[in-house]
Amino acid sequence: MRKVAEAGRHPADAMRAGGIHAASTLADEHHQGLESRLQTTDRHVVTKLSPRMLDRTVRVYSTALAAAFWAGVCGFAMCLAGTFAHQDELVQIGTCAFLSLFAGWGFVNGGVFVWGFVQAVRRYGWRMLIENVWASVFYIAIMTFFVAFGSGMTWMIIRAAMHAPAASR
């Protein structure tokens, strides 16, 4: 057993020094150690953040989604009020605010995907992209979709804001 202790903590070293039983015991200990670390930190495996930082990140994400939602609801109410009051300017402002719901949703989700991608690359390196090609392609496609959707909605907001109401022409 002394040879096993001197060989190090890797199962291959243990097998060379003390035989198959010593290597399998050490491999089991190593596997159990990994499982226990993953079970206690399963929420922080990719991000490697402290619970306080992770809670802050989730709070920012939730707040941004709620702000986009309420801007959209208020914009829809402004569109309805402008339609019933025959106020084209109010309809135009309400349309811009309503479209901000979708722009905000796209940017918030796209931002979270980009942030997760950067964190994963920091933790695992670029090798992760090569080892899991299809998962990487799918993840990048979703990330690109959300950012492109937010950009498209922002472009629609700019066009709606620049378009003069029919009454002022």
Image (spheres, rainbow, N blue to C red):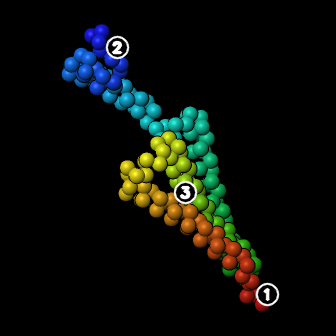
x 24%, y 16%: residue? 18
Quick one: quadrant of the C terminus? bottom right
The answer to whether one can see residue 77 in this image is: no
Q: Residue 151 carries which label?
A: none
x then y, percent, for residue 85: 73, 79
Badge 1 marks a residue whose secondary structure is helix
Give the residue number, with chain letter if any, for mark 2.
6
x then y, percent, for residue 19: 21, 19
Left or right: residue 137 compared with residue 85: left
x then y, percent, for residue 28: 28, 25
Q: How far apart are marks 3 and 1 (CA)?
A: 38 Å
Q: How far apart are marks 3 and 2 (CA)?
A: 51 Å
Badge 3 marks a residue whose secondary structure is helix
Task: Tell me which numbered mark, 3 or 1, is placed earlier along the sequence.
Answer: 3
x 74%, y 84%: residue? 165
Q: Which mark is residue 168?
A: 1
Give the residue number, with chain letter if any, for mark 3.
109
Task: Tell me which numbered mark, 2 or 1, is placed earlier along the sequence.
Answer: 2
